[in-house]
Image (tube, rainbow, N blue to C red):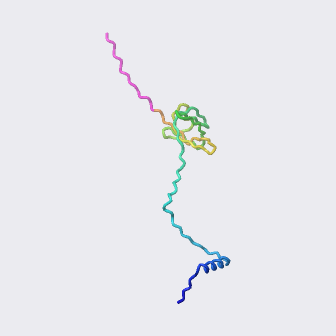
Amino acid sequence: MKITLLTPALVAILGLALAGAPTTAQAQTTTTTPDTTAPAPAKVKKHEKPEFKGSITAISATSVTVANKKKTLTLAITPKTTFKIDKAPATVTDFAVGDKVSGSYSTDASGAMSANSLHKKTPKPAAATTTAPATPAAN
């Protein structure tokens, strides 16, 4: 049995000869395995809507201004704005200056803020006070 070894010179000559030969396209398949060392991508959170609490300082059919100790927000009222009193549906006309409210709002790309929701609770009635019956005057 005769064994032929390729010498480095022969490999170089074959490489040059093959480099000039016309090539044909071949389908190439590759198999990749997932990289378990890379961290998983972070879950995308739903955009949270900022919330507010405060007292109404101005209100109209198109906007509401709510102020608290830290800031004052003027929010546009849109057809998508929801109004609730004690968790029951309401309208903008059910709210007035001085009402303590809470809710959420959105800011668009231009920086304009719109109310998503406006809620208030009915104030609890003041506790009734009882007075002691008057004692008759002594004669």
Count every numbered label the image shows and give the total: 0
| Image point (61%, 79%), residue name | 9
Q: Position of residue 89 (x, y in %)?
A: 52, 41
Helix, strand or loop for the magenta stretch, by majority: loop
Give whichever of 62, 51 is nearer the camera: 51
Give whichever of 26, 90 is nearer the camera: 26
As drawn, which residue projects farthest toward the top?
Answer: 139
Q: Is residue 75 magenta?
A: no
| Image point (31%, 11%), residue name | 138
Above or below, comparing residue 137 to residue 63 in the picture: above
Above or below, comparing residue 45 to residue 83 in the picture: below
Q: Position of residue 26 (x, y in %)?
A: 62, 75
As drawn, which residue projects farthest toward the bottom?
Answer: 1
Q: Is residue 134 magenta?
A: yes
Q: Quadrant of the C terminus?
A: top left
Q: Position of residue 7 (x, y in %)?
A: 58, 80
| Image point (59%, 73%), residue name | 28
Looking at the rendering, the stretch of residues picked out in magenta corresponds to: 124-139
| Image point (53%, 46%), residue name | 48
